[in-house]
Image: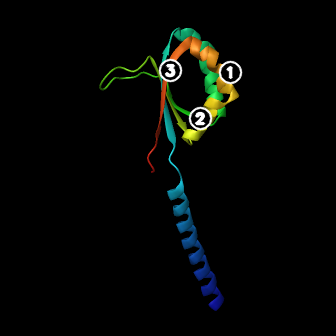
Amino acid sequence: MKTRYSVTLAMLAGFGLGAIAVQGLNAQATPPVYQVVEIEPSDMETYLKDYVPKAQAAIKSAGGKFLAAGGKTTTIEGEPPKPRIVIQQWDSVEKIKAYRDSAAFKELLPLRNKLAKFRSFAIEGLPQ
């Protein structure tokens, strides 16, 4: 009988410690970083055909995740955005900087600069 109580007590204690550990790990998780890019292509068709597939593949392989890309935009207030908007999710600003320092990004730069003007910024997400 004592063994049964000991096992039950050990299981409850383990469960409680596990729950506390998981909550602590979740509290330490850093929120994602969002990169917003406004793009003004000089030739939309060439930009979409020649640049976008290569850039998206490079960004995804570097750890970026696309949340919105080139969809319909609605101006709520102020100046309207550029013709194309992209929103990406990254683990950190350092990951964005690492991508921009990568050979893949540098290889795309001549084509990128030829086909469009870019405005880009990052914002840290809020902890959930």
Left or right of 126: which side holds 97?
Answer: right
Where is 52 relative to 127, above or below? above
Left or right? Give the position of 16 relative to 1: left
Q: Position of residue 3 (x, y in %)?
A: 65, 88
User: Which quadrant of the structure image shows residue 95?
Assistant: top right
Neighbourhood count class around disc 2 (C-alpha, 10 Å): few under 14, some 14–19, many 20 upward: few
Placement of 12 over or under 31, stated as above or below: below
Looking at the image, residue 102 sits to the left or right of residue 64; the answer is right
x and y, in percent, of residue 106 in the image: 66, 23
Q: N-terminal of the two: label 3 or label 1?
A: 1
Residue at 51% x, 9% y is: 42
Q: Which residue is mark 2?
A: 97
| Residue 97 figure quarter | top right
Question: Which residue position holds label 1?
Answer: 107
Q: Of the residues shown, which amino acid type is indicated by label 1?
A: Glu
Q: How far from the left and from the top, in percent, is residue 104? A: 68, 26
- The answer to whether residue 1 is seen in the rendering is no
Q: Observer-nearest residue: 93 or 37?
A: 93
Return the mark for residue 118: 3
| Vertical placement of residue 10 versus 94, above or below | below
- The residues bearing labels 2 and 1 have C-alpha atoms spaced at a distance of 15 Å
| Residue 52 visible in this rendered orientation of the protein | yes
